[in-house]
Image (cartoon, helix red, strand yellow):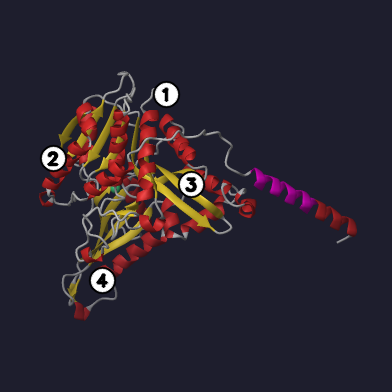
Amino acid sequence: MKKSSKVAFLCAAGVLGALNVKKAIDFVPKKEDYGILDPENVDSVRAQNNLSKAISFATVSRENKDDVDFSEFDKFHEFLEEAYPLIHKNLKKEVICEASLIYKWEGKCKDLDPIALLAHQDVVPISPGTEENWTYPPFSGYNDGTFIWGRGALDMKNHLIGVLEAVETLLSEGFEPERDVYLLFGQDEEISCNEDGGAMNIMRYLKERDIHLDCVLDEGGAILPVNVDYVLKNKNLVGIGIGEKGYCDIKITVFNKGGHSSQAPKHNALGDLADVINDLENHQFKAEMMPFIVNLFDAMGRNCTFPVRMVACHFKKMLPVMKAVMKEIPPAASLIRTTTGVTMASGSPAPNVLPQKASIVVNFRPMPGTSIEDVVNHIKKVVRNKNIEIEVIRSREASVFSPTDSRAFNILKKLIMQEDKDNVVAPYLVMGGTDSYNYQPICENIYRYAPYKVSVDLLLTTHGTNERIPISAIEPGVAFFKRYIRKASAEV
Ligand SMILES: [Zn+2]
Protein backbone atom coordinates (compact mmCIF):
# COMPACT_ATOMS: atom_id res chain seq x y z
CA MET A 1 0.00 0.00 0.00
CA LYS A 2 1.29 3.47 -0.90
CA LYS A 3 1.97 5.79 2.00
CA SER A 4 -0.86 8.16 0.98
CA SER A 5 -3.33 5.23 0.69
CA LYS A 6 -2.22 3.98 4.07
CA VAL A 7 -2.89 7.37 5.63
CA ALA A 8 -6.31 7.55 3.93
CA PHE A 9 -7.15 4.05 5.16
CA LEU A 10 -6.10 4.86 8.73
CA CYS A 11 -8.07 8.12 8.63
CA ALA A 12 -11.18 6.35 7.40
CA ALA A 13 -10.79 3.62 10.06
CA GLY A 14 -10.30 6.33 12.68
CA VAL A 15 -13.44 8.21 11.61
CA LEU A 16 -15.48 4.99 11.55
CA GLY A 17 -14.10 3.98 14.93
CA ALA A 18 -14.95 7.40 16.39
CA LEU A 19 -18.45 7.21 14.91
CA ASN A 20 -18.89 3.77 16.46
CA VAL A 21 -17.73 5.00 19.86
CA LYS A 22 -20.17 7.91 19.57
CA LYS A 23 -22.99 5.50 18.64
CA ALA A 24 -22.14 3.23 21.58
CA ILE A 25 -22.01 6.23 23.95
CA ASP A 26 -25.46 7.32 22.76
CA PHE A 27 -26.87 3.78 22.96
CA VAL A 28 -28.10 4.07 26.53
CA PRO A 29 -31.58 3.88 28.11
CA LYS A 30 -33.78 6.69 26.82
CA LYS A 31 -33.62 9.57 29.27
CA GLU A 32 -37.01 9.76 30.89
CA ASP A 33 -37.78 11.34 34.21
CA TYR A 34 -39.85 8.75 35.99
CA GLY A 35 -39.90 10.73 39.22
CA ILE A 36 -39.46 9.44 42.73
CA LEU A 37 -41.79 7.15 44.63
CA ASP A 38 -43.34 8.37 47.85
CA PRO A 39 -42.89 5.93 50.71
CA GLU A 40 -45.80 3.56 51.14
CA ASN A 41 -47.36 2.44 54.40
CA VAL A 42 -47.19 -1.40 54.54
CA ASP A 43 -47.86 -3.62 57.55
CA SER A 44 -44.96 -5.95 56.86
CA VAL A 45 -45.43 -8.21 59.88
CA ARG A 46 -49.12 -8.71 59.09
CA ALA A 47 -48.29 -9.44 55.44
CA GLN A 48 -45.73 -12.08 56.48
CA ASN A 49 -48.06 -13.70 58.99
CA ASN A 50 -50.96 -13.78 56.56
CA LEU A 51 -48.81 -15.28 53.83
CA SER A 52 -47.57 -17.99 56.20
CA LYS A 53 -51.13 -18.79 57.22
CA ALA A 54 -52.37 -18.73 53.60
CA ILE A 55 -49.75 -21.32 52.65
CA SER A 56 -50.94 -23.62 55.46
CA PHE A 57 -54.19 -24.36 53.58
CA ALA A 58 -53.55 -27.18 51.10
CA THR A 59 -55.64 -25.69 48.30
CA VAL A 60 -54.36 -28.24 45.83
CA SER A 61 -56.03 -28.53 42.43
CA ARG A 62 -56.40 -31.98 40.87
CA GLU A 63 -57.12 -33.14 37.33
CA ASN A 64 -60.16 -35.00 38.62
CA LYS A 65 -62.48 -32.55 40.37
CA ASP A 66 -63.72 -35.33 42.70
CA ASP A 67 -60.21 -35.54 44.16
CA VAL A 68 -60.13 -31.87 45.19
CA ASP A 69 -60.48 -31.25 48.91
CA PHE A 70 -62.79 -28.24 48.82
CA SER A 71 -62.84 -28.06 52.63
CA GLU A 72 -59.31 -26.58 52.39
CA PHE A 73 -60.68 -23.82 50.13
CA ASP A 74 -63.57 -23.22 52.58
CA LYS A 75 -61.12 -22.88 55.46
CA PHE A 76 -58.94 -20.58 53.33
CA HIS A 77 -61.96 -18.34 52.65
CA GLU A 78 -62.82 -18.21 56.36
CA PHE A 79 -59.25 -17.20 57.10
CA LEU A 80 -59.42 -14.41 54.50
CA GLU A 81 -62.60 -13.09 56.12
CA GLU A 82 -60.90 -12.91 59.50
CA ALA A 83 -57.61 -11.53 58.18
CA TYR A 84 -59.13 -8.78 56.00
CA PRO A 85 -62.13 -7.30 57.84
CA LEU A 86 -62.22 -4.03 55.87
CA ILE A 87 -62.27 -5.83 52.54
CA HIS A 88 -65.11 -8.04 53.68
CA LYS A 89 -67.02 -5.04 54.99
CA ASN A 90 -66.54 -2.74 51.99
CA LEU A 91 -66.27 -5.01 48.94
CA LYS A 92 -68.99 -7.21 47.49
CA LYS A 93 -67.93 -10.87 47.48
CA GLU A 94 -69.31 -13.74 45.42
CA VAL A 95 -68.22 -17.36 45.32
CA ILE A 96 -68.78 -19.20 42.05
CA CYS A 97 -67.73 -22.64 40.74
CA GLU A 98 -67.47 -23.96 44.31
CA ALA A 99 -64.41 -21.94 45.26
CA SER A 100 -63.63 -19.11 42.82
CA LEU A 101 -63.77 -15.67 44.43
CA ILE A 102 -65.01 -12.41 42.95
CA TYR A 103 -64.56 -9.22 44.97
CA LYS A 104 -65.96 -5.94 43.69
CA TRP A 105 -64.76 -2.64 45.07
CA GLU A 106 -67.12 0.02 43.79
CA GLY A 107 -65.54 3.06 42.24
CA LYS A 108 -66.87 6.61 42.19
CA CYS A 109 -67.29 6.89 38.39
CA LYS A 110 -69.73 4.41 36.95
CA ASP A 111 -68.95 5.28 33.34
CA LEU A 112 -65.29 4.20 33.51
CA ASP A 113 -64.21 0.66 32.69
CA PRO A 114 -63.18 -1.29 35.81
CA ILE A 115 -59.73 -2.75 36.42
CA ALA A 116 -59.03 -6.31 37.59
CA LEU A 117 -56.28 -7.92 39.63
CA LEU A 118 -56.01 -11.68 39.29
CA ALA A 119 -54.48 -14.45 41.37
CA HIS A 120 -55.17 -18.16 41.60
CA GLN A 121 -55.83 -19.74 44.99
CA ASP A 122 -54.78 -23.24 44.01
CA VAL A 123 -51.34 -24.79 44.16
CA VAL A 124 -49.78 -27.87 42.58
CA PRO A 125 -49.44 -31.02 44.69
CA ILE A 126 -46.19 -32.20 46.24
CA SER A 127 -44.64 -34.93 44.07
CA PRO A 128 -45.15 -38.22 45.95
CA GLY A 129 -41.94 -39.32 47.65
CA THR A 130 -40.41 -35.83 47.80
CA GLU A 131 -42.13 -34.65 51.01
CA GLU A 132 -39.07 -35.58 53.07
CA ASN A 133 -36.78 -33.48 50.86
CA TRP A 134 -38.34 -30.25 52.08
CA THR A 135 -36.34 -28.34 54.68
CA TYR A 136 -39.64 -27.31 56.29
CA PRO A 137 -42.96 -29.06 55.60
CA PRO A 138 -44.57 -27.81 52.35
CA PHE A 139 -47.78 -26.62 53.99
CA SER A 140 -46.15 -25.15 57.09
CA GLY A 141 -45.67 -21.60 55.79
CA TYR A 142 -42.68 -21.57 58.11
CA ASN A 143 -41.00 -18.19 58.54
CA ASP A 144 -37.31 -18.59 59.40
CA GLY A 145 -36.63 -14.86 59.39
CA THR A 146 -35.14 -14.93 55.88
CA PHE A 147 -37.71 -16.91 53.88
CA ILE A 148 -41.31 -18.03 54.09
CA TRP A 149 -41.41 -21.65 53.02
CA GLY A 150 -44.09 -23.67 51.37
CA ARG A 151 -46.14 -24.53 48.33
CA GLY A 152 -47.59 -21.36 46.88
CA ALA A 153 -44.94 -19.05 48.38
CA LEU A 154 -44.06 -17.97 44.82
CA ASP A 155 -46.93 -19.42 42.80
CA MET A 156 -48.92 -17.54 43.86
CA LYS A 157 -50.25 -16.99 47.33
CA ASN A 158 -47.60 -14.28 47.66
CA HIS A 159 -49.36 -12.37 44.89
CA LEU A 160 -52.88 -13.04 46.23
CA ILE A 161 -51.96 -11.95 49.76
CA GLY A 162 -50.02 -8.99 48.35
CA VAL A 163 -53.14 -7.73 46.56
CA LEU A 164 -55.35 -8.21 49.63
CA GLU A 165 -52.81 -6.51 51.91
CA ALA A 166 -52.72 -3.57 49.51
CA VAL A 167 -56.51 -3.22 49.35
CA GLU A 168 -56.96 -3.62 53.13
CA THR A 169 -54.37 -0.90 53.75
CA LEU A 170 -55.80 1.42 51.09
CA LEU A 171 -59.24 1.03 52.72
CA SER A 172 -57.77 1.82 56.14
CA GLU A 173 -56.28 4.98 54.62
CA GLY A 174 -59.68 6.03 53.28
CA PHE A 175 -58.75 5.60 49.61
CA GLU A 176 -61.68 5.50 47.20
CA PRO A 177 -61.06 4.32 43.63
CA GLU A 178 -62.60 6.13 40.69
CA ARG A 179 -63.02 2.95 38.67
CA ASP A 180 -64.52 -0.27 40.02
CA VAL A 181 -61.73 -2.62 41.12
CA TYR A 182 -62.24 -6.36 40.77
CA LEU A 183 -60.16 -8.92 42.65
CA LEU A 184 -60.61 -12.21 40.82
CA PHE A 185 -59.22 -15.36 42.38
CA GLY A 186 -59.81 -18.59 40.45
CA GLN A 187 -59.41 -21.97 42.10
CA ASP A 188 -58.00 -24.25 39.40
CA GLU A 189 -55.41 -22.43 37.28
CA GLU A 190 -52.87 -25.21 37.66
CA ILE A 191 -55.07 -27.73 35.88
CA SER A 192 -57.59 -25.81 33.86
CA CYS A 193 -57.10 -25.64 30.18
CA ASN A 194 -60.78 -26.01 29.58
CA GLU A 195 -64.07 -24.23 29.27
CA ASP A 196 -65.14 -25.14 32.81
CA GLY A 197 -62.26 -23.53 34.69
CA GLY A 198 -62.76 -20.96 37.43
CA ALA A 199 -61.23 -18.11 35.41
CA MET A 200 -63.38 -18.81 32.34
CA ASN A 201 -66.49 -18.83 34.52
CA ILE A 202 -65.51 -15.59 36.25
CA MET A 203 -65.03 -14.00 32.82
CA ARG A 204 -68.49 -15.24 31.76
CA TYR A 205 -69.97 -13.88 35.00
CA LEU A 206 -68.55 -10.44 34.15
CA LYS A 207 -69.49 -10.64 30.48
CA GLU A 208 -73.09 -11.50 31.31
CA ARG A 209 -73.17 -8.26 33.28
CA ASP A 210 -71.81 -6.32 30.27
CA ILE A 211 -68.55 -5.57 32.01
CA HIS A 212 -65.59 -4.62 29.85
CA LEU A 213 -62.32 -4.36 31.75
CA ASP A 214 -59.85 -1.54 31.18
CA CYS A 215 -56.95 -3.79 32.19
CA VAL A 216 -56.04 -7.08 33.84
CA LEU A 217 -52.95 -7.78 35.93
CA ASP A 218 -52.01 -11.41 36.61
CA GLU A 219 -48.97 -13.51 37.53
CA GLY A 220 -45.96 -13.26 35.21
CA GLY A 221 -42.40 -12.04 35.04
CA ALA A 222 -40.64 -11.40 38.35
CA ILE A 223 -37.77 -9.01 39.04
CA LEU A 224 -34.68 -11.07 38.20
CA PRO A 225 -31.29 -9.78 39.34
CA VAL A 226 -28.58 -10.23 36.68
CA ASN A 227 -24.88 -9.66 37.03
CA VAL A 228 -22.87 -10.91 34.09
CA ASP A 229 -19.22 -9.87 34.24
CA TYR A 230 -18.26 -7.28 31.58
CA VAL A 231 -21.75 -7.44 30.02
CA LEU A 232 -24.69 -6.58 32.27
CA LYS A 233 -23.68 -5.31 35.72
CA ASN A 234 -26.03 -5.16 38.70
CA LYS A 235 -29.23 -4.88 36.72
CA ASN A 236 -32.65 -6.44 37.19
CA LEU A 237 -34.48 -7.93 34.24
CA VAL A 238 -38.19 -7.24 34.56
CA GLY A 239 -40.49 -8.85 32.03
CA ILE A 240 -44.08 -7.75 31.56
CA GLY A 241 -45.89 -10.63 29.86
CA ILE A 242 -47.92 -9.30 26.94
CA GLY A 243 -48.92 -12.63 25.41
CA GLU A 244 -48.97 -16.39 25.88
CA LYS A 245 -47.99 -19.20 23.60
CA GLY A 246 -50.66 -21.70 22.65
CA TYR A 247 -50.74 -25.38 23.55
CA CYS A 248 -51.47 -28.35 21.36
CA ASP A 249 -51.11 -32.13 21.73
CA ILE A 250 -51.52 -33.94 18.44
CA LYS A 251 -51.62 -37.71 17.96
CA ILE A 252 -50.23 -38.94 14.66
CA THR A 253 -50.91 -42.55 13.67
CA VAL A 254 -49.47 -44.60 10.82
CA PHE A 255 -50.85 -47.91 9.61
CA ASN A 256 -49.10 -50.98 8.23
CA LYS A 257 -49.53 -54.75 7.96
CA GLY A 258 -49.07 -56.50 11.29
CA GLY A 259 -48.00 -60.11 11.68
CA HIS A 260 -45.51 -62.29 13.50
CA SER A 261 -42.25 -60.65 14.45
CA SER A 262 -40.32 -63.78 13.38
CA GLN A 263 -41.13 -62.84 9.77
CA ALA A 264 -40.65 -59.12 10.00
CA PRO A 265 -40.46 -57.04 6.80
CA LYS A 266 -37.70 -54.47 6.38
CA HIS A 267 -40.01 -51.68 7.69
CA ASN A 268 -43.13 -51.92 9.77
CA ALA A 269 -45.42 -49.23 11.21
CA LEU A 270 -42.79 -48.15 13.74
CA GLY A 271 -40.20 -47.71 11.00
CA ASP A 272 -42.68 -45.57 9.07
CA LEU A 273 -43.34 -43.62 12.23
CA ALA A 274 -39.62 -42.91 12.61
CA ASP A 275 -39.75 -41.21 9.19
CA VAL A 276 -42.66 -39.08 10.40
CA ILE A 277 -40.63 -38.00 13.43
CA ASN A 278 -37.65 -37.18 11.24
CA ASP A 279 -39.80 -35.11 8.91
CA LEU A 280 -41.24 -33.13 11.81
CA GLU A 281 -37.89 -32.58 13.51
CA ASN A 282 -36.12 -31.64 10.30
CA HIS A 283 -38.82 -29.16 9.26
CA GLN A 284 -39.29 -26.88 12.23
CA PHE A 285 -41.67 -23.92 12.10
CA LYS A 286 -40.31 -20.70 10.68
CA ALA A 287 -38.60 -18.51 13.27
CA GLU A 288 -39.48 -14.84 13.45
CA MET A 289 -37.92 -11.95 15.37
CA MET A 290 -41.18 -10.39 16.54
CA PRO A 291 -41.29 -6.78 17.82
CA PHE A 292 -41.19 -7.86 21.48
CA ILE A 293 -37.88 -9.66 20.86
CA VAL A 294 -36.44 -6.57 19.18
CA ASN A 295 -37.62 -4.47 22.17
CA LEU A 296 -36.04 -6.97 24.56
CA PHE A 297 -32.63 -6.78 22.81
CA ASP A 298 -32.90 -3.02 22.59
CA ALA A 299 -33.62 -2.69 26.33
CA MET A 300 -30.85 -5.11 27.29
CA GLY A 301 -28.32 -3.72 24.82
CA ARG A 302 -28.73 -0.15 26.09
CA ASN A 303 -27.98 -1.34 29.63
CA CYS A 304 -24.83 -3.27 28.77
CA THR A 305 -21.35 -2.11 29.77
CA PHE A 306 -19.56 0.22 27.34
CA PRO A 307 -17.35 -2.26 25.43
CA VAL A 308 -20.32 -4.55 24.83
CA ARG A 309 -22.43 -1.62 23.66
CA MET A 310 -19.89 -1.07 20.84
CA VAL A 311 -21.35 -4.25 19.36
CA ALA A 312 -24.84 -4.12 20.90
CA CYS A 313 -25.64 -0.75 19.32
CA HIS A 314 -25.62 -2.51 15.94
CA PHE A 315 -28.01 -5.25 17.07
CA LYS A 316 -30.66 -4.40 14.48
CA LYS A 317 -28.21 -5.20 11.69
CA MET A 318 -27.32 -8.43 13.46
CA LEU A 319 -30.88 -9.71 13.86
CA PRO A 320 -30.50 -12.37 11.13
CA VAL A 321 -27.35 -13.72 12.84
CA MET A 322 -29.02 -13.60 16.24
CA LYS A 323 -32.00 -15.46 14.84
CA ALA A 324 -29.72 -18.17 13.46
CA VAL A 325 -28.03 -18.54 16.85
CA MET A 326 -31.29 -18.50 18.82
CA LYS A 327 -32.71 -21.26 16.65
CA GLU A 328 -29.94 -23.55 17.91
CA ILE A 329 -30.58 -22.88 21.63
CA PRO A 330 -33.89 -24.48 22.69
CA PRO A 331 -34.94 -21.97 25.40
CA ALA A 332 -34.13 -19.09 23.03
CA ALA A 333 -35.74 -20.82 20.07
CA SER A 334 -38.99 -21.17 22.00
CA LEU A 335 -39.24 -17.36 22.01
CA ILE A 336 -39.11 -17.03 18.25
CA ARG A 337 -41.01 -19.96 16.84
CA THR A 338 -43.70 -22.56 17.38
CA THR A 339 -41.92 -25.48 18.99
CA THR A 340 -42.25 -29.16 18.10
CA GLY A 341 -41.68 -31.76 20.82
CA VAL A 342 -42.32 -35.44 20.16
CA THR A 343 -43.18 -36.75 23.61
CA MET A 344 -44.93 -40.14 23.48
CA ALA A 345 -44.82 -43.20 21.23
CA SER A 346 -46.62 -46.51 21.07
CA GLY A 347 -46.42 -49.58 18.87
CA SER A 348 -47.75 -53.13 19.21
CA PRO A 349 -49.07 -54.55 22.49
CA ALA A 350 -46.53 -57.43 22.68
CA PRO A 351 -42.81 -58.00 21.97
CA ASN A 352 -43.48 -60.68 19.33
CA VAL A 353 -46.29 -58.87 17.50
CA LEU A 354 -45.65 -56.50 14.61
CA PRO A 355 -47.64 -53.27 15.00
CA GLN A 356 -50.63 -52.79 12.70
CA LYS A 357 -50.58 -49.19 13.72
CA ALA A 358 -48.15 -47.02 15.63
CA SER A 359 -48.58 -43.55 16.96
CA ILE A 360 -46.80 -40.61 18.52
CA VAL A 361 -48.02 -37.65 20.47
CA VAL A 362 -46.39 -34.35 19.57
CA ASN A 363 -46.61 -31.32 21.81
CA PHE A 364 -46.59 -28.05 19.87
CA ARG A 365 -46.44 -24.60 21.49
CA PRO A 366 -47.79 -22.20 18.87
CA MET A 367 -46.62 -18.60 18.71
CA PRO A 368 -49.26 -15.85 18.76
CA GLY A 369 -50.41 -15.64 15.15
CA THR A 370 -50.10 -19.37 14.53
CA SER A 371 -53.40 -21.21 14.97
CA ILE A 372 -53.98 -24.88 15.78
CA GLU A 373 -55.25 -25.23 12.20
CA ASP A 374 -51.91 -23.85 10.97
CA VAL A 375 -50.15 -26.54 13.02
CA VAL A 376 -52.24 -29.31 11.46
CA ASN A 377 -51.55 -27.90 7.99
CA HIS A 378 -47.84 -27.78 8.79
CA ILE A 379 -47.89 -31.50 9.68
CA LYS A 380 -49.73 -32.33 6.44
CA LYS A 381 -47.18 -30.32 4.48
CA VAL A 382 -43.91 -31.57 5.95
CA VAL A 383 -44.68 -35.24 6.58
CA ARG A 384 -44.03 -37.10 3.34
CA ASN A 385 -46.19 -40.09 4.33
CA LYS A 386 -49.69 -39.00 3.35
CA ASN A 387 -51.29 -42.11 4.83
CA ILE A 388 -51.34 -40.77 8.37
CA GLU A 389 -54.14 -39.98 10.78
CA ILE A 390 -53.93 -36.66 12.66
CA GLU A 391 -55.94 -36.14 15.82
CA VAL A 392 -55.87 -33.01 17.96
CA ILE A 393 -56.15 -34.34 21.51
CA ARG A 394 -55.92 -31.16 23.53
CA SER A 395 -55.38 -27.60 22.44
CA ARG A 396 -55.53 -23.96 23.36
CA GLU A 397 -54.91 -21.20 20.82
CA ALA A 398 -52.11 -18.73 21.54
CA SER A 399 -53.24 -15.41 22.98
CA VAL A 400 -53.15 -12.17 21.08
CA PHE A 401 -50.50 -9.63 22.10
CA SER A 402 -51.54 -6.84 24.44
CA PRO A 403 -50.36 -3.38 23.39
CA THR A 404 -47.21 -1.82 24.85
CA ASP A 405 -48.52 1.73 24.62
CA SER A 406 -51.70 1.40 26.69
CA ARG A 407 -52.44 3.38 29.85
CA ALA A 408 -52.01 0.25 31.98
CA PHE A 409 -48.68 -0.76 30.39
CA ASN A 410 -47.32 2.74 30.90
CA ILE A 411 -48.40 2.72 34.56
CA LEU A 412 -46.67 -0.64 35.07
CA LYS A 413 -43.49 0.44 33.34
CA LYS A 414 -43.30 3.74 35.18
CA LEU A 415 -43.84 2.12 38.59
CA ILE A 416 -41.18 -0.49 37.89
CA MET A 417 -38.67 2.13 36.74
CA GLN A 418 -39.43 4.37 39.72
CA GLU A 419 -38.78 1.46 42.04
CA ASP A 420 -35.20 0.97 40.87
CA LYS A 421 -33.29 2.78 38.10
CA ASP A 422 -31.39 -0.47 37.45
CA ASN A 423 -34.57 -2.26 36.41
CA VAL A 424 -34.52 -3.16 32.71
CA VAL A 425 -38.16 -3.43 31.66
CA ALA A 426 -39.15 -5.32 28.53
CA PRO A 427 -42.32 -6.95 27.26
CA TYR A 428 -42.08 -10.72 26.93
CA LEU A 429 -43.95 -13.83 25.87
CA VAL A 430 -45.20 -16.22 28.56
CA MET A 431 -44.42 -19.85 27.75
CA GLY A 432 -47.07 -21.45 29.96
CA GLY A 433 -50.68 -20.44 30.43
CA THR A 434 -52.22 -18.11 33.00
CA ASP A 435 -55.80 -17.42 34.07
CA SER A 436 -55.60 -14.02 32.40
CA TYR A 437 -55.82 -15.70 28.97
CA ASN A 438 -59.51 -16.32 29.65
CA TYR A 439 -60.25 -12.60 29.93
CA GLN A 440 -59.48 -11.80 26.29
CA PRO A 441 -63.19 -11.56 25.35
CA ILE A 442 -63.67 -8.65 27.79
CA CYS A 443 -60.24 -6.98 27.89
CA GLU A 444 -57.52 -5.93 25.44
CA ASN A 445 -54.92 -4.82 27.99
CA ILE A 446 -53.80 -7.99 29.75
CA TYR A 447 -50.43 -7.94 31.55
CA ARG A 448 -48.56 -10.57 33.51
CA TYR A 449 -46.15 -9.31 36.11
CA ALA A 450 -45.18 -10.35 39.65
CA PRO A 451 -43.63 -7.48 41.67
CA TYR A 452 -41.24 -9.73 43.58
CA LYS A 453 -37.46 -9.64 43.43
CA VAL A 454 -36.40 -13.27 43.32
CA SER A 455 -33.20 -14.92 42.10
CA VAL A 456 -33.35 -17.43 39.27
CA ASP A 457 -32.36 -20.24 41.66
CA LEU A 458 -35.28 -19.48 43.93
CA LEU A 459 -37.63 -19.10 41.01
CA LEU A 460 -36.79 -22.65 39.98
CA THR A 461 -38.29 -23.93 43.25
CA THR A 462 -41.72 -23.01 41.87
CA HIS A 463 -43.69 -26.27 41.48
CA GLY A 464 -40.65 -28.03 43.03
CA THR A 465 -39.12 -28.79 46.41
CA ASN A 466 -38.42 -26.02 48.94
CA GLU A 467 -40.53 -23.35 47.22
CA ARG A 468 -39.97 -20.21 49.27
CA ILE A 469 -39.99 -16.45 49.05
CA PRO A 470 -37.45 -14.04 50.54
CA ILE A 471 -39.03 -11.95 53.30
CA SER A 472 -37.29 -8.92 51.78
CA ALA A 473 -39.51 -9.22 48.68
CA ILE A 474 -42.84 -9.07 50.53
CA GLU A 475 -43.05 -5.42 51.56
CA PRO A 476 -42.08 -4.00 48.13
CA GLY A 477 -44.67 -6.34 46.59
CA VAL A 478 -47.49 -4.94 48.73
CA ALA A 479 -46.28 -1.38 48.13
CA PHE A 480 -46.30 -2.01 44.38
CA PHE A 481 -49.92 -3.25 44.46
CA LYS A 482 -51.01 -0.22 46.49
CA ARG A 483 -49.43 2.16 44.00
CA TYR A 484 -50.69 0.22 41.01
CA ILE A 485 -54.28 0.14 42.30
CA ARG A 486 -54.18 3.85 43.05
CA LYS A 487 -52.88 4.73 39.58
CA ALA A 488 -54.76 2.16 37.50
CA SER A 489 -58.12 2.83 39.17
CA ALA A 490 -57.83 6.55 38.41
CA GLU A 491 -59.55 8.02 35.37
CA VAL A 492 -56.31 8.68 33.51
ZN1 LIG B 1 -49.34 -19.74 38.90
Residue at 29 percent of width and 25 percent of height:
180
Snapshot quadrant of residue 1? bottom right
Q: Earlier in the sequence, mark 1 or mark 2?
A: 2
Assess whether mark 2 and mark 1 are in contact (beta carbons under 8 angstroms): no
Q: Earlier in the sequence, mark 4 or mark 2?
A: 2
Q: Mark 4 points at which residue?
A: 268
Q: Which of marks 4 and 1 is in front?
A: 1
Magenta stretch, residue numbers: 12-26
- Amino acid on which disc 2 is placed: Glu
Q: Mark 2 points at which residue?
A: 98
Q: Is residue 204 at all visible to an observer of this figure?
A: no
Q: Earlier in the sequence, mark 3 or mark 1?
A: 3
- Amino acid on which disc 4 is placed: Asn
Kindly identify which numbered label has been placed on residue 293.
Answer: 3
Q: Which of marks 4 and 1 is nearer the N terminus?
A: 4
Instruction: Give the percent coordinates (x, y) of residue 249.
Output: 27, 53
Secondary structure under tag 2 reads: loop
Instruction: Give the percent coordinates (x, y) of residue 306.
Output: 63, 51
